[in-house]
Amino acid sequence: MTARLTDGSMRARLTLVVDLVALASFVAIGMRSHTEGAKAAIFLRNAVPVTVAWLICAAAFRTYRGPSLRSVVKTWLVAVPVGLAVRTVWVGSPTGSRIVLFFAVAMSFTALFLLGGRLLSAFAASKFSEEEPL
């Protein structure tokens, strides 16, 4: 038996997609500092650890079963550092004191991207619910 990641509602599914797009956008913007290798390979080596960690934590914390601020904060506080740690081991950088700055910047910007995405989806949802049926 497979547990579903969302509660099946349109709101939960939209929130999941918006969060994943926010994380992918964070990775894509961060790629500007990477010049070696193919763009797709760079994207994947940075996005896969964070995305997999996010989905595992989202399932564990039931982030998309009645989406709430509390569940997304718990998911963010665990998934992003774990994903960044896996990515750092995989890629081999940053090292030394630079890792603290890397984690601080990544935590700050993923929070901003996730918050921005959720604000946009809440705005869109409010606009769609205000429309009269055709």
Image: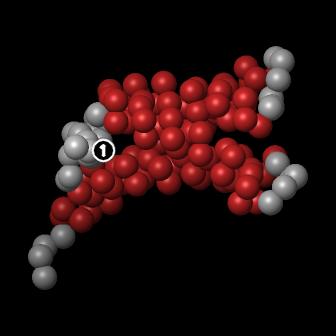
Q: Residue under label 1, please give it.
A: 5
Picture quarter containing residue 124?
A: bottom left
Task: Tell me if I can see residue 77 in this picture.
Answer: yes
- The residue that appears at 58% across and 26% down in the rendered structure is 81
**Residue 119, above or below 124:** above
- Viewer-proximal residue among 82 and 107: 82
In this view, the residue farthest toward the left is: 133
Residue type of the residue flagged with mark 1? Leu
Badge 1 crowding class, 10 Å Cα cut-off, few under 14, some 14 to 19, many 20 or more, is some
Badge 1 element:
loop
- The residue that appears at 22% across and 43% down in the rendered structure is 1
> How many numbered badges does the structure rendering display?
1
- The residue that appears at 84% across and 55% down in the rendered structure is 37
- Viewer-proximal residue among 119 and 111: 111
- Viewer-proximal residue among 58 and 21: 58
- The residue that appears at 59% across and 39% down in the rendered structure is 49
